[in-house]
Image (cartoon, grey):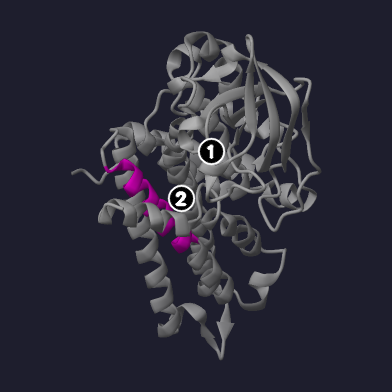
Amino acid sequence: MDFELSEEQRAFQDTARDFAVTEMMPQARQWDEDEIFPVETLRKAAALGFGGIYVKEDVGGSALDRLDAAVIFEELAQGCTSTAAYISIHNMAAWMIDQFGSDELRRRFLPKLCTMEHFASYCLTEPGAGSDAASLTTKARRDGDHYVLDGAKAFISGGGRSDLYVVMARTGDAGPRGISCIVVENGTPGLSFGAQEKKLGWKSQPTAMVLFENCRVPVSNRIGEEGHGFRIAMAGLDGGRLNIGACSIGGAQFCLDRTIDYMKERKQFGTRLSEFQALQFRVADYATELEAARLMLHRAAVAVGNKDGNATRLAAMAKRIATDTGFEVVNGCLQLHGGYGYLRDHPIERVLRDVRVHQILEGTNEVMRLIISRQMLGN
């Protein structure tokens, strides 16, 4: 049991940190204020290998493992939590094509996804099927060599902007075994989008409903076998939960580092904040909780990478503790900044708005508790 990063992992970490500091951090506020999807910055990230982190090398991926990815996303999130989270979603969709798609599908779609010439979205949630994802109603009716899709997906990151949509649709009976996974290309007749959602945070990535009306897609665009879509979607989410947890830890570490600097400078009652024991204890607790969440996340990342039998449970545990801890630490850092923390001139409030949704997406933290308890109790 070695808790030290390898030399190669430290190199990934340094590369991601440098990119976050030089390419993301200086622009993050503007991206948030003006709701800018930073296409060129994303493509620069892809040039470093971050567009296909755990995609195989034969189609342009970096072929790294889940622990490598967790290290990378923690650093990227310190530059811009919202943008790092979109990179995570793009990677999840690309991995699903790489892991379960045909060789023809892999070679057709993945090279441009790995360079982020093309962007990808993951489409599972529907207006009436959130936590109960297996009840989805978007249908894909077989018609010769095509599927005809009808339905709607909600809260889709990249909606209206992505080039590929990895869609879970019902090809069979009710329940998870009736769901298949299909790639729908932007520009396909019958594919349209709702208005851009107005969100609390995550403003550097577009979010919209994705709509299908008599949308004809070749059967060859199906990922994996018919009826395997829900299993594929859940496999994607195991990794997505790790990444979003890493983004929460990264955002919280960013805020904690700045809060420590602020406490060393700010004086009240003639004394620096850093000299008040009550505030020292709070900072100590934040650092301890972040380190515990980080260790849990890295443990789960190794399990997911090794296809451990407990991987799904561990990924749920890691996502729950990392996103809850991340939000609590950021919220506490805002409190330690007092009124200044509430101002948009300081980055803490932006990170707070961005990390809040991590407790909801990739499966709510209530659903994470359900996954954990079901495996423990055999329900």
Residue at point 42% right, 76% down? 282
Q: Identify the residue position indicated by label 1 in the image.
A: 88
Q: Mark 2 or mark 1: which comes first in sequence?
A: 1
The quarter holding residue 169 reads: top right
Q: Is residue 274 magenta?
A: no
Residue at point 43% right, 22% down? 99
Q: Is residue 367 above or below residue 42?
A: below
The quarter holding residue 241 reads: top left
Q: Secondary structure at mark 1?
A: helix
Amino acid type assigned to the residue bearing label 1 in the image: Ser
Amino acid type assigned to the residue bearing label 2 in the image: Gly
The magenta span reads: 310-326
Mark 1 Cα within 10 Å, few/some/many (few <14, many 20+)?
A: many
* Residue 109 in sight here: no
Q: Secondary structure at mark 2?
A: helix
The quarter holding residue 37 reads: top right
Q: Identify the residue position indicated by label 2 in the image.
A: 245
The residue most toward the front is 173
Q: Is residue 313 magenta?
A: yes
* Residue 307 in sight here: yes
* Residue 131 placement (x, y as % from top left): 53, 51
26 and 220: which one is in front? 220
Quadrant housing the N terminus: top left
